[in-house]
Image (spheres, rainbow, N blue to C red):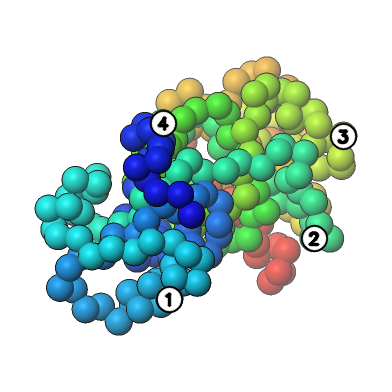
């Protein structure tokens, strides 16, 4: 296992907190150079992390609060920080494989790393098989994303689509139904749609939504029904949670 000193500081990132570090150790989606534990802290939960790190030949080191603060983006690291490399992304073609009906999600236009992490958290919990992203460097916000997702960002299979329209056509050719969320007149209620089939779902960001070009590619447009006459769209994290868990309900509990 290489040390962080052997790499440019631009490529040494940090993951903060027990959940995020544990997820990185289990998921193995990125290189882990070293794990720092706060000196003098005796948390029982650290024992499992230390054991996993030693089994994987990852160096561990006791560090002062000041040392940890140099690597932390916030104050919620709880006494443990992992110095890591960039997250590995899968080839686009490898998503949606397997015997289960595919449930893939395109997250497009999300600007806030906390919202991104929260969305991944809901998708992982609801059983999504993978997430497709537009090109963007989330590495500088790795700690925030991992913390907001409770480690789910490390487990979720993810791929980058350089051309989203071509990616959509690729998965449609593989038999996935492409669904979008929108408030248009063509939209049908989420609860009246069959979500048991293989699905590629696109949820846009709060600011610009989904482009008309992409909407024209949709096999179906979904709308989340409201109890009141409220004309505004839900925030992305709420929309992701509502749709993902309705997907789960139909597939596993209906």
Q: Tell me how many marks there are.
A: 4
Element on which disc 1 rests: helix
Which part of the image, by quadrant, shows the C terminus? bottom right
- Relative to residue 98, is residue 44 depicted above or below? below
The residue labelled by disc 4 is 111
Separation of residues labelled 4 and 2 (CA atoms): 31 Å
The residue labelled by disc 1 is 51
Compare residues 121 and 227 and report the one nearer the observer: 121
- Earlier along the polypeptide chain: callout 1 or callout 2? 1
Separation of residues labelled 4 and 1 (CA atoms): 36 Å
Question: Label 2: few (<14), some or many (≥20) within 10 Å?
Answer: few
- Earlier along the polypeptide chain: callout 4 or callout 3? 4
Element on which disc 4 rests: loop
Compare residues 63 and 116 and report the one nearer the observer: 63
* Residue 98 location (% of width, % of height): 81, 57
The residue labelled by disc 2 is 100
The residue labelled by disc 3 is 173
């Amino acid at each position: 296992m290489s040390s962080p000193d052997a790499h440019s500081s631009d490529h040494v990132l940090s993951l903060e907190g027990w959940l995020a570090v544990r997820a990185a150790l289990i998921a193995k989606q990125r290189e882990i150079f070293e794990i720092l534990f706060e000196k003098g802290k005796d948390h029982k939960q650290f024992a499992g992390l230390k054991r996993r790190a030693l089994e994987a030949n990852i160096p561990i080191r006791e560090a002062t609060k000041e040392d940890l603060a140099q690597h932390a983006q916030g104050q919620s690291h709880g006494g443990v920080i992992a110095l890591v490399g960039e997250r590995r992304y899968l080839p686009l073609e490898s998503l949606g494989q397997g015997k289960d009906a595919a449930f893939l999600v395109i997250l497009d236009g999300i600007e806030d790393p906390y919202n991104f992490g929260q969305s991944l958290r809901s998708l992982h919990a609801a059983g999504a098989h993978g997430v497709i992203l537009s090109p963007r460097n989330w590495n500088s916000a790795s700690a925030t994303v991992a913390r907001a997702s409770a480690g789910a960002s490390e487990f979720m299979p993810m791929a980058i689509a350089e051309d989203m329209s071509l990616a959509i056509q690729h998965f449609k050719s593989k038999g996935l139904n492409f669904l979008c969320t929108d408030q248009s007149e063509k939209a049908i209620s989420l609860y009246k749609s069959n979500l048991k089939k293989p699905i590629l779902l696109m949820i846009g960001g709060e600011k610009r939504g989904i482009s008309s070009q992409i909407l024209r590619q949709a096999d179906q447009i979904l709308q989340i029904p409201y109890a009141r006459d409220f004309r505004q769209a839900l925030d992305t994290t709420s929309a992701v949670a509502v749709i993902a868990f309705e997907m789960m309900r139909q597939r596993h509990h209906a």
